[in-house]
Image (cartoon, rainbow, N blue to C red):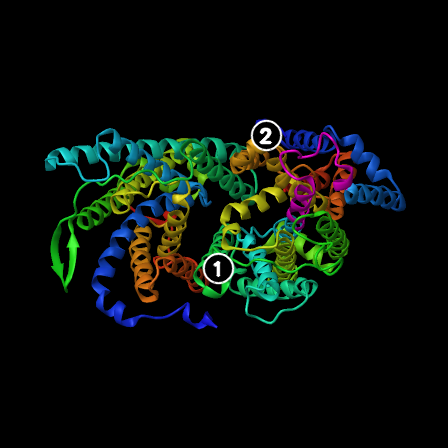
Amino acid sequence: MSMGNAPMGGAAQAQDKQDQQLAMSTRKGRFAGLGTWWNNLERWQQWLVLSVVALLVFLLPMINPPLITTEPGYDFPTACFDMARFALAALGLNVVVGQAGLLDLGYVGFFAVGCYVAALWTSPDSSLVHIPYLWTLPLAMVVTVFFGIMLGIPTLRLRGDYLAIVTLGFGEIIRILATIIPALKGNSGFQNIGHPPGGSKSDPWFSPENLTPWYWLTVAIIIVIMLLLGNLERSRVGRAWIAIREDEDAAETMGVPTFKFKLWAFAMGAAIGGLSGAIFAGGIGYVNNQKFDVPTSMLFLAAVVLGGTGNKFGAVLGGAIVSYIPNRFLSLADQKYLIFGIILVILMIFRPQGLLGARNHLLAAIGRLRSWVGSAPSGTATEAATGATSISLRKEEDK
Amino acid sequence: MPADTWVSFDFTALHDQFWSATFDGLTFGAIYALVALGYTLVYGVLNLINFAHSEVFITGAYAVVFTLSWLGFGASPPNLSTVAIIGDLVLACLAAMAAAAIVALIIERVAYKPLRDRGAPRLVFLITAIGMSFVIQYAIFWWRGANKEEAVIMFQAKPVFDIFGAIITSDQVIIVTAAVVMMVAVDQFIRRTRLGRGIRAVAQDPDTATLMGVNKERIIMTTFVIGGVLAGAGALFYIMKIPSGAVYNGGFILGIKAFTAAVLGGIGNIRGALLGGLLLGVIGNYGQVLLGRSDWTDVVCFVVLVLVLMVRPEGILGSNLAKVRA
């Protein structure tokens, strides 16, 4: 993007030129051909391609592709499971940050709550009633939704930076409470967390030793959630989220109950975070207070931003990348936070929309409208219209 | 279930230690206030929270530790004359101020200027700041590892006063006095000098200020430098109170508390930062004594932050930098 170099305060012509450049830059790029090809496919063809991709994703730990594999340094099914659970968490955070535009820096708090729900109700170290592991998944979602609403009601009246700080505080409070409350067993934590049924007692299908079944389970859940989220995005709720993200005041003025929909987004994001936490706890089989620090929250955020804020495919891709890189390049593992910090800064400066930009049919429609208006003969009314749409375009770019 | 025993209120302890907790709280509050000023000034001028300010602070703390160990300070206070100690401390303070100011400037140039030029939305600024904070934190981690730096004890604190049975030590007197003097100096600087007037003008309306011949970029850099300098001074006092406090992620919690202090007093308000810092220090200490565990201080601070934001989001003193009159 070359917006910064364009002369500021120039005539409308300069503005127009700038907009054209901008519109071009959205279409250019290395994968532009791929994007055009994809958008020109029929709906059923897209589904076909997606199911092939999904099959490949499912078979990933079996194929163990030579260049991609993390072995011998790191067990590849474990790396796959890591990628999947990170992708799931990023998918949830994307609802909050990407769709509704609420910067949540305490997302790891929900993840932690999910972990502890699974641990408290299945681990033999806990004195609570024990339930089958699969029941803890919906239970974790219910409990985290409760936490999400508890956090959301007082804080969602806040905007931007303030919300970020308060949610950061929430994440820290959860971590500190996990240390302070004796029932949560602090550092010693919970062992032998449950797993889904299947296999014999001595050799279950789902075990922390072989994470491939866990990976399949997580990917299946990701696909289901992506389908549900896709529907939600196209519904009234999704449109309200986009409206809030783009301009909260305007949305409020136009009659969108912003608080209600922000709370919705928070609850949805929390539920998915809790779910990924419960899966994580089951997969690795133990939970203690060491995994829920602020840097982890930032990694989730980095995943969403890297993939493309507001794009669920982007979030999944970003989550997978963020967890994959340290496992693939073990010598870099110690510096993963440094690397992702640098990536965050560079991305925000040069490509704030992330790897895959937000796919928004609403905003895409505005883009089409803009190019249509732009091709019309110039006049005062047209100029006014181009001015207005160029603002929307720029916002789409920047997200 | 032991679940009902993890939180208990120890009112006798609070009653017995009330005054010592107050004075100790004021000491930490003065440190919070110094760091809070960095948040407040940047917020006043740019309307954004400099998330990476906690890393500015921790750089200062490292500079203090390195300078003092180079001067021969260590785990036990050296046997020096008062004048020599004061000279060394001033040297360490200057080093910390310089280091912190340089880091603050780097953050401004690398993370904020390119975005300002591009007219990015606010969420983008925030994410860049988080990224920057990560980069600095983990660059320190890479360099120094996860362990705390060795403690440097500057001098043996001596009891000075005795108020209501609480003993006030010399370091407490030094910290609170120096912090208040510095805050007053900055306040007067903003109110009386030409550069201060420029800062107020940019805070009020950057575009008009530019038209009136104010160099906006220079003003922004000045605010970052002032914030850095005060964070450096805060770092010296912090190491004075917690000698082994220099660790790569040590700035995070203190940064959050300083930000809370800034919000509590009214973000963008210099006097508010002082008031908020002192108040928060005292409240946090009461919470710690009452609940009997130092972990609780952080929880208390966060809860105070949420309550303040809910009840009075503009803070106690409310006004902002733009409305300050000379």
Please give the residue where the numbered disc 1 appears in the rendered image: A178
Residue A308 seen by the camera: no
Q: Quadrant of the N terminus of chain A?
A: top right
Q: Tell me which residue sits at (58%, 61%) in the image.
A: A119
In front: A48, or B126? A48
**Which numbered disc covers residue A10?**
2
Residue B320 is a magenta residue: no
Residue A26 seen by the camera: yes
Q: In the rendered structure, which disc, 1 or 2, sits on the residue that comes first in sequence? A: 2
Quadrant in the rendering for residue B71: top left
Residue B209, position as x, y percentages in the image: 42, 37
Magenta-drawn segment: A60-88
Label 1 element class: helix
Residue B168, position as x, y percentages in the image: 16, 55
Residue A82 is a magenta residue: yes
Crowding near the residue tagged with mark 2, few <14, some 14–19, many ≥20 C-alpha atoms within 10 Å: few
Kind of residue at disc 1: Ala
